[in-house]
């Protein structure tokens, strides 16, 4: 479990998945609504990953001023930063794709129909428009 979780599975679930993932999901939806490309969501999640890392350090990892400089890597752990950011990118991608599918099937309903919750397809010539 140490591959994903630093100290406590509950802390990872609460801070990274629930709080960070919720923010990432909403950010992905907002970026899709603005017709932004997905790479901007990934870029924003890199910044959000820094904030989530800070929350882990400040709330659950015995944050003290000397721990900023310690070599054990609580705050500046690249491994856990990448893990947190990957979860955030996945949540943002889910929100982005759900919103983009809704946009394409609602705004261009005469051209596209919903295939699944995350995809759309072109309507056939004989389908009602």
Image (cartoon, grey):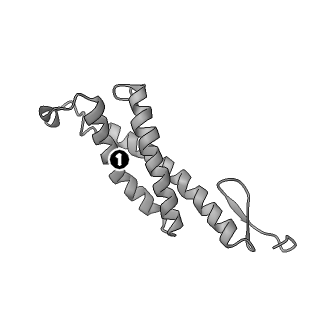
Locate the C terminus by quadrant: bottom right
Q: Residue at x 71, y 54 (%)?
A: 116
The relative height of residue 115 versus residue 9 in the rendered view (above or below) is below
Report the side of 121 relative to 15 (left or right): right
Query: According to the image, label 1 marks what residue?
Result: 49
Label 1: how many Cα within 10 Å (few below 14, some 14–19, many 20+): many
> Residue 112 in the image: x percent, y percent?
72, 68
Element at label 1: helix
Locate the N terminus by quadrant: top left
Q: Residue at x 23, y 28 (%)?
A: 62
The quarter holding residue 126 reads bottom right
Q: Residue at x 48, y 68 (%)?
A: 36
Report the side of 50 relative to 14 (left or right): left
Report the side of 27 relative to 66 (left or right): right
Q: Residue at x 48, y 66 (%)?
A: 37
> Residue 100 in the image: x percent, y percent?
59, 63
* 96 or 23: nearer the viewer: 23
């Amino acid at each position: 479990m140490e591959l994903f979780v630093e100290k406590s599975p509950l802390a990872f679930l609460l801070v990274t998945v629930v709080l960070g993932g919720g923010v990432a999901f909403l950010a992905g939806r907002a970026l899709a609504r603005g017709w932004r490309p997905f790479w901007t969501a990934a870029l924003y999640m890199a910044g959000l990953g820094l904030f989530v890392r800070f929350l882990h350090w400040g709330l659950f990892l015995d944050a003290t001023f000397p721990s900023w400089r310690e070599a054990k890597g609580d705050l500046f752990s690249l491994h856990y930063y990448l893990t947190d950011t990957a979860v955030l990118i996945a949540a943002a991608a889910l929100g982005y794709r759900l919103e983009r599918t809704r946009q394409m099937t609602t705004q261009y309903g005469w051209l596209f129909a919903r295939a699944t919750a995350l995809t759309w397809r072109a309507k056939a010539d004989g389908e009602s428009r």
